[in-house]
Amino acid sequence: NAIFIACALGTDDIFVQRNKWRSAREQHPNASTEFIAIHSLPDAYLATLVTSVSTSGAFFATALTPVAGVVLFGVYAGLLVVTDYILSVFIVSPVLCLQDEREQRLGSNIDGETLSSSGSTTIDSGITDETEATSAPRESKILVTCSSLKQMASIDSYFNFLCKHRWPLMVFCLGILAACGYTATRLQAPPSDPRPSFLSGSAIQFERHRSLLNNMVFYRIFMEENKVSQFQLVFGLNAIDNGKFLDPSYEAQGTISFDESFNPASTQLYLLELCERIFGEDGIGHKVDEDYRHGCVMEQFDMWLQDESTSLAPTEGFVEECLSSPSVPVPAAIFDQCFFAFVSAGSTKKHRGERRYLFREGKLKVLTIEFSTNSTVLSSSKDVSAEYARIADWSRMEQAQAPRPEASNFFVSSKVMWYHETLSTVTSSIFVSAGIALLVASTVILLATKSLTIMLTSIIATCYILLATISSVVMLGWTKGLFESIFFSLVVGLGSDFVLHVGLAYVTSKVGGCKEERAKYALLHMGPSIFASSSTTLATAFVMTFSEILTTKKFATVLILTMIHSTVGGCLVFLVLCLCFGPQDQPKQSPANKLL
């Protein structure tokens, strides 16, 4: 996917530079290559710099997501944007200069078509150049060829339509924006089985095998017998994560943090009674194994003491380590050694291999109580959230009623909760990243244009692109998942490019203060680049739709929708808002343009 992102962003920068160069060459057909470079490349650099900063900022904003895969994708895509801009400046610009010098020597224009007095056409553009003010009137003539005349005529007709119906179109655009916003709110979590799918279609053998398993009898029986998930109520550990989640090495996974206040010897009866409250009518779960009280190790310990005390041949560990204690509680001074004797004697019983206790330096440091619920990874996010709320409420009540402070320091853990928490964190943080990306884009356009009106209209147009894309995938039946959330971060990054191009051209236009002339200048000078870049990206995304990998198909779908709505947002929504509310004061050169 990163290759397609690089192609999409790279072609955008190339088309902007080429279009600026061609416009300057058509305006000054007899000028030198150095003159054309001075008058075209700074504007192209500024336009691509603004979009590169906003796009890379949108990708880098995904670093707020506490999921390593999402962070790495965002940082990598952001670096691709920066690299694209640098390469376009240092490679594309020299190529344009060399091509122009060659064509000037051959007597050809930038399109390779020979100009003659009979084959040239002029149109009024309203563009004024200060360096040629002595030889050209204010309304100078631009020399164009027949190949570009039809394109400009089409753009001119489209612009006249926008000017004539600007107010009805403005109401229509705002209505569409409201409808898209309402539809986007209907993006819901999947009703069941939120696990991401990777393949589509039956052409992949792995997919065929997975479909076969889903229909086999033994798979159905397995699912019938495993409709529960295991939870652990943990004593003796602190619920913290001190690992480096961006580092996949084993050394960076973090360390165990023990709760030094945990003292099981002084809370034996509480731990034993806690088992009954967990599995009771008002409890939070049921036993994993009813035959041997598999979930609660303290019940097993108490039963072992009772069995050994009534046995005619008790084990040596019971006699020597437990001093023949008949049941819980055992004396606190011998609890750790007695519990270790129970663990050693129970090595042949059913709890063998279960890590429900942990000894350090002869002391019982960690104790867990296992229970199960009806929520699994296949359950919907709504059901798991309800289960989480029920367990959290029970835990708070139990901690408040604990007889000793050290007995109240426990937490509940489960792989089901890990998965759903990760999914929820990713989806929520992605939307936060989208908001940060909007803030970055608006800040960049404000600094580049020094126009609050242009910044507000840019935000509205970008919001349209984001909401329209999300509402489109909602109508396609998508739900809120891991991959969908990652893809939505692309919408703000890629979707704001066209809006920024048109907005910057509107403010830095070389025509008078009339907003109609400035809007027409922006459309004539950036419209061809936008349509060319959009067409290239759409063609690339169309090829990706033939992939058998579902994530690639979804990425292509989001890319296609983003390009369509970006073109509409930049060349319709934004221009209509500028025609209705755009600034009309004389254009001022921005600080960034002066620096370039």
Image (tube, rainbow, N blue to C red):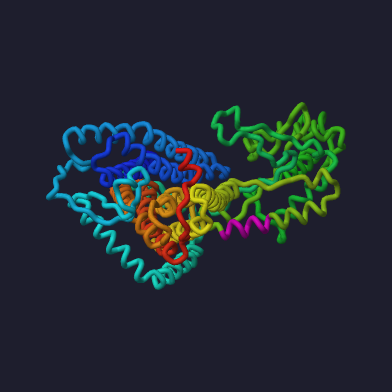
In the rendered image, the residue lying farthest to the front is 134
In this view of the protein, which residue sits in the foreground, 222 or 360? 360
Locate residue 290 relative to residue 553 in the image: left or right.
right
Tell me if residue 546 can be seen: no
User: Is the residue 26 above or below the residue 519 in the image?
Assistant: above
In this view of the protein, which residue sits in the foreground, 279 or 490? 490
Q: Position of residue 426 (x, y in %)?
A: 54, 49
Count numbered badges in the picture.
Answer: 0
Q: What are the residue bounds of the magenta stretch?
A: 382-391
User: Is the residue 568 above or below the residue 239 in the image?
Assistant: below
Q: Where is residue 483 in the image (x, y as percent from the top left)?
A: 46, 49
Residue occupying image coordinates x 21% and y 56%: 150
Q: Position of residue 3 (x, y in %)?
A: 36, 39
- Quadrant where the C terminus lies? top left
Secondary structure, magenta segment, majority class: helix
Residue 385 is a magenta residue: yes
Residue occupying image coordinates x 72% and y 57%: 393
Tell me if residue 3 can be seen: yes
Locate residue 151 relative to residue 245 in the image: left or right.
left
Residue 162 is a magenta residue: no
In this view of the protein, which residue sits in the foreground, 174 or 400? 174
Q: Position of residue 75 (x, y in %)?
A: 49, 38
Examine the image and state in which quarter residue 234 appears. top right
Examine the image and state in which quarter residue 571 appears. bottom left
Residue occupying image coordinates x 54% and y 54%: 227
In the rendered image, the residue lying farthest to the bottom is 168
User: Is the residue 132 above or below the residue 123 in the image?
Assistant: above
Locate residue 320 relative to residue 176 in the image: left or right.
right
- Quadrant where the N terminus lies? top left
